[in-house]
Amino acid sequence: MSSSQSNELKGRVAIVTGGGTGIGLAIARRFRDEGAAVIICGRREEKLLEAAEKMGGGAGGVHAIRADVTRTEDIQRLVRFAEERAGRIDILVNNAGFMRFGTLEETGPAMWDEMMKTNAFAPWQVTKAVLPAMRRAGGGSIINISSIAGHKALPGAGLYCTTKAALQMLSQVFAMELAPENIRVNVICPAAVEETELAQPIFGPERVSEFYDVMRGLHPLGRNGKPQDVAEAALFLASDRSAWITGILLPVDGGRHLSTNRPPIKS
Ligand SMILES: NC(=O)c1ccc[n+]([C@@H]2O[C@H](COP(=O)([O-])OP(=O)(O)OC[C@H]3O[C@@H](n4cnc5c(N)ncnc54)[C@H](OP(=O)(O)O)[C@@H]3O)[C@@H](O)[C@H]2O)c1
């Protein structure tokens, strides 16, 4: 897909949760490049401010607010902030999320609560909070960032798989319920995406590149993804080019959803 600019989102307002780093940052930048006003949120204010400044700040149409999407009062503040700064909400990208490893047997209730709350409960809450503004705008596009883990059983990542599977079904039911109001809900399912912070707390900065070296070989297209690969798909789903598409689970994964991880058999 090309990354040319055509002001496709001119006049639109987008919220991108977790927009200070990685995939969220690339989506925020791509939307801004297409003329949208963008509100980014996360828990680390300094990361957000740095990201917003790099994108031109308020003058460039990018506004940052510290908000933890697992906290109801923060979500309300986020939505109020977006409407005050930009006047409307047309697009929501539920991107904030995190991953930890461990077998299901090893996984404890505290991690279950935290990951479910961030990866599935928060998108439900943020979606509910933006609906009044989307209705006033006459419709909207909601894009949820899941993972290949939402439809592949990955041993050692069972809780992450479970949270993303929940996010996918939540998205599809919302898609059905909101379709009569012209509010579309779609899901992007990436495989391994480099240049993000996702794997850092698991491996530490030194071993992250080893992890991505191993992952590279699992993608039929022969490389890991970049945040920009996901941003291009998000732009399509945010724009009117996808006006008749709702409820899809779009793999953006170098073909990994097809992979059996077995070597080709030669006769
Ligand atoms: N990278 C991959 O290989 C990959 C593959 C498939 C799917 N994904 C999904 O892509 C999404 C983005 O992840 P990423 O890869 O770009 O990793 P990332 O760089 O770690 O981005 C995650 C972002 O979410 C924010 N966040 C986390 N918890 C939050 C909370 N409670 N409230 C508000 N913001 C929160 C983080 O900021 P703060 O810490 O400052 O809050 C961070 O900016 C995630 O949903 C992830 O599951 C990633």
Image (spheres, grey):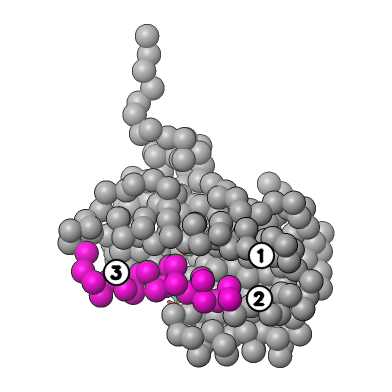
**Badge 2 local density, few (<14 within 10 Å), some, or many (20+)?**
some
Q: For the residues carrying marks 3 and 1, which lies nearer the camera in this image?
A: 1
Marks 3 and 2 sit apart, C-alpha to C-alpha, by 28 Å
Most foreground residue, 260 or 141 = 141
Give residue 6's quadrant in the image.
bottom right
- Residue 55 inside the magenta-drawn segment: no
| Number of other residues with Cα within 10 Å of mark 1, as a class: few under 14, some 14 to 19, many 20 or more | some
Q: Is residue 132 left or right of residue 126?
A: right
Picture quadrant of residue 76: bottom right
Quadrant position of residue 206: bottom left
Magenta stretch bounds: 107-128
Contact, mark 3 vs mark 2 (Cβ under 8 Å) = no
Which marked residue is nearer to the observer: mark 3 or mark 2? 2
The relative height of residue 256 versus residue 9 in the rendered view (above or below) is: above
SS of the residue under disc 2: helix
Magenta span includes 124: yes
For the residue pair 195 and 14, the one nearer the viewer reads as 14
Q: Sequence-wise, which precedes: disc 3 or disc 2?
A: 3
The answer to whether any part of residue 212 appears in the image is yes
Residue at left 79%, top 71%?
Answer: 138
- Name the residue located 38 percent from the left edge and 33 percent from the top edge: 260
Disc 2 marks which residue? 131
Q: Position of residue 77 (x, y in %)?
A: 57, 90
Q: Which residue does the numbered mark 3 point to in the structure image? A: 112
The CA distance from mark 2 to mark 1 is 9 Å
Q: For the view shown, which residue lies furthest in the top direction? A: 267
What is the three-letter code of the residue carrying label 1? Answer: Leu
**Tag 2–tag 1 contact (CB < 8 Å):** yes
Which disc, if any, is residue 178? Answer: 1
Q: Position of residue 85 (x, y in %)?
A: 71, 88
**Amino acid at the residue labelled 3:** Trp
Q: Secondary structure at mark 3?
A: helix
